[in-house]
Structures are given as C-alpha cells and as structure tokens.
Amino acid sequence: MSREAAKIVLDAVLRHAAEQDTALIEIQAKCSPEEFKRYKQMIGKSMGAIFLEIVHPIVAQYPDLKPPQMK
C-alpha cells in the first residue's frame, strides 16, 4: 500500500468515525435509553472495526500518519 493511498483512506475513515460520533450525539435526545444503547453498541462495533481493521494496519506501516487522537 502506498503512503499516499493510505493517507487518503485514513482521512476518510477518521471522518466517518467522527460522523458516527456526531450522529450519536444528535439522536440521544430522540431515543429511549434502551434504543440509544442499541445504537451506541452498533456504532461502537463499527468504530472498533474501523480502528482495528483499517487505522491500526495503516499506522503500523506508516507511523507518521498516526492521528493525534491516538497519541
């Protein structure tokens, strides 16, 4: 994987993770606590997969691309 391609993918998945976090904030007041908990679990699984399957392998190969929030 090239550094340039890795940077593009990394930027995209980090934006996606931030959007998911924002969505949780937006829906919290619109859901029952039980429903919100289910959404939070779904988003948590998605974010976990993003970091385990995409971010970590990229950062392992290109440590200089490590996002500030991971330091």
Image (cartoon, rainbow, N blue to C red):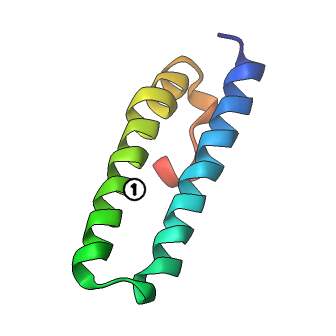
Viewer-proximal residue, 51 or 46? Answer: 46
| Furthest residue toward right | 4
Expressed as whole percent of the image width and height from the top left, the position of residue 25 reads 49, 78
Answer left or right for 35 relative to 10. left
| Left or right: residue 46 compared with residue 5 | left
Neighbour class for label 1 at 10 Å: few (<14), some, many (≥20)? some
Give the residue type at disc 1.
Ile
Look at the picture and state if 22 lies above or below 48: below
Q: Going by the picture, which residue comes out furthest to the left? A: 34
Looking at the rendering, in which quadrant would you find the N terminus?
top right
Q: Nearer the viewer, residue 10 or 16?
A: 16
- Residue 71 visible in this rendered orientation of the protein: no
Q: Is residue 64 visible?
A: yes
Residue 32 as seen in the image, left or right of residue 3: left
- Residue reaching furthest to the bottom: 29
**Residue 39: horizontal and vertical position, in percent?**
35, 64
Q: Name which residue lies at 53% across and 28% down.
A: 59
Q: What's the residue at 45%, 30% (across, down)?
A: 56
Please give the count of numbered marks on the rendered protein.
1
Percent x, y of residue 54: 50, 29
Q: What residue appears at the point 39 percent right and 56 percent down from the top-left corner?
A: 43
- Quadrant of residue 63 within the rendered picture: top right
Task: Please report the residue visible at 68 percent of the width from the left and 41 percent of the height from the top.
Answer: 12
Q: Secondary structure at mark 1?
A: helix
Foreground pick, 7 / 37:
37
Q: Position of residue 55 (x, y in %)?
A: 50, 33
Would you name the residue on which mark 1 appears? 43
